[in-house]
Amino acid sequence: MNRFTKVLLGVAILNVVAGLLFVTGVINVDAAPGLYAIFPLGVVCTGVFFIFFAVEKETAMYDIEEWVHEIDLEKYNHSHADELHHGYGHHAPMHA
């Protein structure tokens, strides 16, 4: 897990636990009813965490594939640059 995913998991757990404490009445928040929104926020953060966690491995594999593709492309370009410097495939200019 990368840092953002860990932070998202921490925020999700913190909000769900705090929200459950508010909703069940263990902590009385009747004076600030806006705090009841913490529980749904925690649930949303949990869902976003699961999405990021599921996609994280695929993103890492894509990055590796792109990196390998760039290396292969550089090797291909270097090999053709060597051919041009050594005269392979070089045609003499045609004059009229």
Image: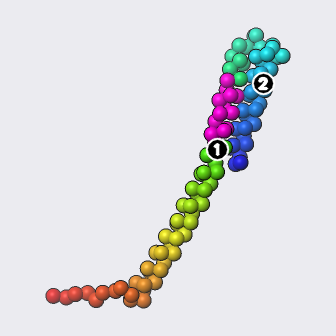
SS assignment for the magenta stretch, majority: helix
Between residue 3 and residue 13, name the one nearer to us. 13
User: Is 32 located above or below residue 93 in the figure?
Assistant: above
Helix, strand or loop status at disc 2: helix
| Quarter of the figure with residue 84 | bottom left
The residue singled out by tag 1 in the image is: 54
- Residue indicated by mark 2: 18
The three-letter code of the residue at mark 2 reads Ala
Are there few (<14), some (14-19), or many (20+) residues within 10 Å of tag 1?
few
Q: Position of residue 40 (x, y in %)?
A: 67, 23
Q: Residue furthest top?
A: 30
**Residue 29 image-quadrant placement:** top right
Q: Residue at x 54, y 69 (%)?
A: 71
Percent across and percent down for residue 39 are 71, 23
Image coordinates of residue 17 in percent, x first then y, are 78, 26
| 25 horizontally vs 91: left or right | right
Callout count: 2
Q: Residue at x 80, y 20 (%)?
A: 21
Going from the N terminus, do you reach mark 1 or mark 2 first? 2
On-image quarter of the C terminus: bottom left
Point out the stretch of residues depicted in magenta. Answer: 40-52
Amino acid type, callout 1 = Ala
Which class describes the residues within 10 Å of circle 2: few (<14), some (14-19), or many (20+)?
some
User: Does residue 45 show up magenta in the picture?
Assistant: yes
